[in-house]
Amino acid sequence: MEHALKGRKQSPEHLANRKAAWQKSPAKEKTSGRFTDLNKSRTGKPLSDEQKKKISEAMKGKRNSLGVQRPKEFREKLSKYWAENKEKHPRYKDGLGAVRGGERRFDMGRLQYRLWRESVFERDNWKCVQCGRGGKVCADHIKAYSQYPELRYEVSNGRTLCLSCHIKTENYGHKANRV
């Protein structure tokens, strides 16, 4: 037996009434509690390699899934478009973003910088070159970013480090600027 409303467009008033009725019903409390308990029972439990693989395969090719990498040509075209049409961008204010946020932070948002980071990560297989750990890694400039502007986008001047190893380097933060 089909539902009586299947295939019919419902008015906003009707939808609001249905939602209000659902909010008051005891079934809502029972259902939402069950899902909350199910989620809590899984919290902190590691996934098996098979589960991770299934999730990864299911997410591949999805439009808004994390990890979807657009082709380099597409990204370059988009970067060029926004460089030429800054005023049309939803976050555009007055063209002083580099002044407010700092030149380096502004530069880190550019496509050339992001491609440099990805190239360094891929070359080092997404693992720290000092301790071998993966996970949350940083792209570090071997010769300081501020002192060697000509080497900023050279992949040979980059290395992949985990955060704890990155903090210990001589270039971390403003250490490179001290003489």
Image: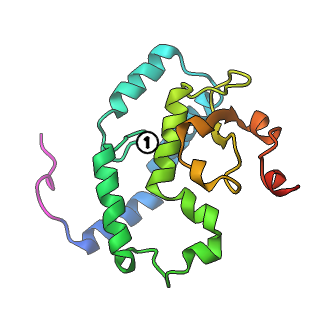
Q: Main secondary structure of the magenta part?
A: loop
Q: Mark 1 is on which residue type?
A: Leu
Please name the residue shown 28% across and 50% down the image. 74
Residue 118 percent coordinates (x, y): 49, 39
Q: Left or right: 147 with respect to 51?
A: right
Residue 135 percent coordinates (x, y): 62, 30
Residue 131 percent coordinates (x, y): 73, 22
Q: Left or right: 131 with respect to 36?
A: right
Which residues fall within the magenta stretch? 1-9
Please name the residue shown 87% across and 56% down the image. 178
The foreground one among 163 and 112 is 112
Q: Residues within 10 Å of mark 1 (few under 14, many from 20)?
A: few
The foreground one among 19 and 177 is 177
**Residue 18 visible somewhere in the drawing:** no
Please name the residue shown 43% across and 39% down the image. 67
The foreground one among 12 and 130 is 130
Q: Left or right: 8 with respect to 125?
A: left
Considering the image in quadrants, where does the C terminus appear? bottom right
Considering the image in quadrants, where does the N terminus appear? top left
Q: Is the residue 76 above or below the residue 31 in the image?
A: below
Please name the residue shown 46% across and 74% down the image. 91
Q: What residue is disc 1 on?
A: 66
